[in-house]
Amino acid sequence: MTSTATTTTAPRSPWPSLAVDSWTDTRETLHLWTQIVGKIRLAQASMVNHWWQIPLYVTPRGLSTTSIPYGDQQFEIELNFLHPRAHRRPRGR
């Protein structure tokens, strides 16, 4: 009786490994900024089932809200990862 050894290798991932310790400060800062934006949205937007008025949406540049009502105006907040700063863009009057 002969046996043949089969060598298997794990499939190679197209994603690089990400060492969490190397970006802890960035992760914590992003977490705090998203909480701030979420609280602004929570305070300004009308309640929708399952908190659907709160999420941030992925954009080509980072994260963004949809229009947020403020009195008779609207605004949105964008967390731009390419040019790191928070943007406030007024919408209509």
Image (tube, rainbow, N blue to C red):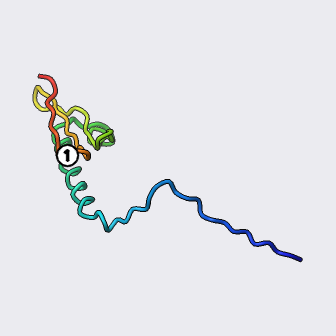
Q: Tell me if 85 is positioned left or right of 50 in this view.
A: left
The residue identified by callout 1 is 37
How dense is the environment of label 1, judged by Cα within 10 Å: few (below 14), some, or many (20 and up)? many
Query: What residue is rendered at 27% in x and 59% in y?
Result: 27
Quarter where residue 77 is shown: top left
Quarter where residue 87 is shown: top left
Q: Tell me if 79 is positioned left or right of 71 in this view.
A: right
Residue 28 position (above or below residue 6):
above
SS at mark 1?
Answer: helix
Q: For the N terminus, which image quadrant?
A: bottom right
Residue 16 position (above or below residue 48):
below
Query: What residue is rendered at 37% in x and 65% in y?
Result: 19
From the top left corner, tell me how far across and down residue 53 is, in percent. 27, 38
Quarter where residue 43 is shown: top left
Q: Tell me if 73 is positioned left or right of 58 in this view.
A: left
Task: Give the residue furthest to the bottom.
Answer: 1
Query: What residue is rendered at 19% in x and 46% in y?
Result: 37
Query: What residue is rendered at 23% in x and 63% in y?
Result: 25
Task: Give the residue furthest to the right.
Answer: 1
From the top left corner, tell me how far across and down residue 49 is, in percent. 32, 38
